[in-house]
Amino acid sequence: MTKKLLPFILMLAFSKAVLADNALVLQTDFSLKDGAVSAMKGVAFSVDENLKMFDLTHEIPPYDIWEAAYRLYQTAPYWKAGTVFVSVVDPGVGTDRKSVVLKTKTGHYFVTPDNGTLTLVAEHLGIESVREIDEKKNRLSGSEKSYTFHGRDVYAYTGARLASGTISFDEVGNELEKNVLEIPYQKAVLEQTHLKGNIPILDIQYGNIWTNISDELLEKSNIKKGDVACVEIKEGNQIKYSGKMPYVSSFGDVEEGKPLLYLNSLLNVSFALNMASFSKTYGIYSGANWNVNLHKCR
């Protein structure tokens, strides 16, 4: 009898762990200087102590919705379908901006204010459905008088309930139209022989410049390894850099301190100075208003 009951006993013992099948990944601009992130994690674990919880980053520059959007796009494709991302970069906290959960066509979930944070994942992973968080059902009990910490009270709580299986996606709230607030930016395009694109992010540790121009688009431009590219970088309408650099495989292919064009780990066109910071040297940064234009030098 005991042997017959053993599988059933084991199933009951591990049933809670089965609930927490999907990972919960957190991103904020809170940093780790105080207890804000820890409070979010405490709320999540109070929903299900078996949650598999991970940090994407908590070092998004304060209020930088664009960088939050990029880090989600950069990271999400490497996580399996069903993963729940909670992203809290929310300068409009307490206002009438919507709190939503986006389900992408790849099966990932994003819990966040609808303030532009979803721009890139919506574009690249596709929108399967968007639901507005019903705070009457999906809000930490006792937090109703709090208006400035929705990361803890709404997003961490809802994300944990979704990741743990406590609620289904349909139980998040009412379904909205299949669109989200988007931040306008320069898409990567080839116009005759000129490539145009955006600088969405820096390789921050080393000061390298990453663009959204793919290797496929670079190939179509007829710029080959060993060719010299003419590069112009603008912030808005103001030219911040204009120069020439060779297209090479890696940093050591040019002399120390010299510029180069290469493909980064995402196989996008990037610029660097060997053993130096391109960003600091030329005052180049990233964001929706930082754009690049390049072509093969004659």
Image (cartoon, rainbow, N blue to C red):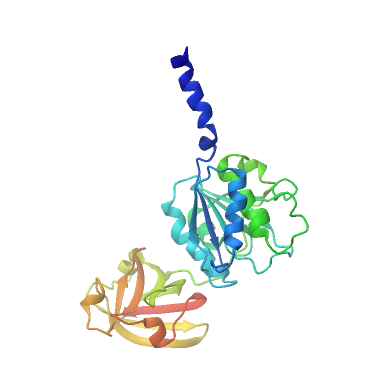
- Residue 224, quarter of the rendered image: bottom left
Residue 28 visible in the current orientation: yes
Q: Is residue 87 above or below residue 201?
A: above
Reply above or below: 111 against 1: below
Instruction: Name the foreground residue: 284 vs 57.
Output: 57
Residue 207 x, y percent position in the rendering: 39, 78
Looking at the image, residue 158 sits to the left or right of residue 53; the answer is right
The residue positioned farthest toward the top in the image shown: 1
In the image, residue 48 sits, relative to residue 147, either above or below, namely above
Residue ranking furthest to the right? 145
Question: Which residue corresponds to the image point at 61% horizontal and 62% vertical from the top-left?
Answer: 36
Relative placement, left or right, of 215 versus 47 is left
Q: Residue at x 65, y 69 (%)?
A: 91
Q: Position of residue 271 (x, y in %)?
A: 35, 77
Image coordinates of residue 117 in percent, x first then y, are 57, 63
Across and down, in percent, residue 62 comes to 58, 72
Left or right: 168 with respect to 253?
A: right
Is 164 drawn above or below residue 182 in the view shown?
above
User: Which one is in front, 288 or 31?
Assistant: 31
Residue at coordinates 28% horizontally, 85% vertically from top-left? 257
Number of numbered callouts drawn:
0
Q: Nearer the viewer, residue 125 or 76?
A: 76
Q: Quadrant of residue 64?
A: bottom right
Q: Is residue 178 visible?
A: no
In the rendered image, the quadrant that contains the C terminus is bottom left
